[in-house]
Image (tube, grey):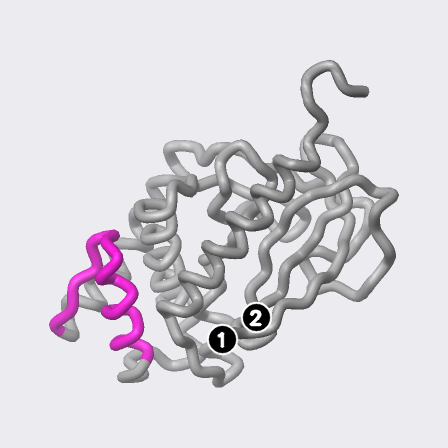
Amino acid sequence: MAALAADLGVIRTRDVALVCRVGLVSLLGLAVVSCRKPQEAAPVSLTAREVPGPKKTAIARPTPAELGRVEEQLAVAERLASAHGLVLDGGEDDLKALQSLLDRRVLAPNQTYELQCLGLALGRVMVNRSALVWVTVEDEYGRDPAVNVDGTSVLLFPLTMISKRVEQGRDIPVEELYRTTVAEARRMAEAEKRRAPRVGEH
């Protein structure tokens, strides 16, 4: 199992400044965001999207148009799988199909759009099998689909989970990526809920 390290960063969600814990799985390069109080944090270096600065980050339910774009990209992934005798339908068997596509190297590292479509197929498994929900994250880099532990600030970004690793020439153990990501997201969500003030507390 990959070792876990922690970084801190400042984002803004709905105009409220929050300091976020970013769980990084060293082997997999995973980033999972969970917010906590500013006074608990210390400055550290971050990846581009989490760099502190005067920007606003908004998390919202996707619009019908945004969900439609996700469906379009999932259809690209499904057609790619079908062309290689595989099926992607949102079930847990998709993890094996995605692994097969990656092991066969059917996509080149510069086919970013198609690789991101595979990432969204991974995200669909997370949503279907792990009680997570699609959201849209908007910041100075644009609007992107993400996966959220409902009722918390914990976010996963499947869109680039596969493409970045392929571009870097790294092996991708898809099932381990899925299980480690979801387990860490749940752990951080539970930690966030425990930190939340109870009714009547100030």
Q: Which mark is residue 29?
A: 2
Q: Amino acid at mark 2?
A: Gly
Q: Is residue 72 magenta?
A: no
- Label whose residue precedes the other's in the sequence (2 or 1): 2
Residue name at image x 16 percent, y 75 percent: 84
Asked if residue 196 is positioned above or below residue 141 in the image, the reply reads above
- Point 79% across, 66% down: residue: 45
Q: Tell me where residue 13 appears, x and y as whole percent.
A: 69, 36
Position in image of residue 76 (x %, y %) = 27, 60
Q: What is the x, y in percent for residue 77?
A: 27, 62
Circle 1 sits in a helix, a strand or a loop, which is it?
Answer: helix
Q: CA distance from mark 2 to mark 1?
A: 8 Å
Q: Position of residue 56 (x, y in %)?
A: 72, 40
The quadrant holding residue 175 is: bottom left
Q: Amino acid at mark 1?
A: Arg
Task: Please report contact status of discs 2 and 1: CB closer than 8 Å, yes or no.
Answer: yes
Which residue sits at x=25%, y=52%?
90
Q: Which residue occupies the extreme left position in the image?
A: 85
Residue underneath mark 1: 165
Q: Residues within 10 Å of mark 1 (few under 14, many from 20)?
A: some
Taking the image as shown, residue 84 lies to the left or right of residue 72, namely left
State whether residue 18 is above or below residue 49. Answer: above
Look at the picture and state if 148 lies above or below 200. Answer: below
**Residue occupying image coordinates x 21% and y 59%:** 88
Q: Quadrant of residue 92?
A: bottom left
Mark 2 burial class by Cα count in 10 Å: few <14, some 14-19, many 20+: some
Question: Which stretch did the figure color magenta?
Answer: 85-102
Instruction: Look at the numbered disc 2 and give the secondary structure of its residue.
Output: loop
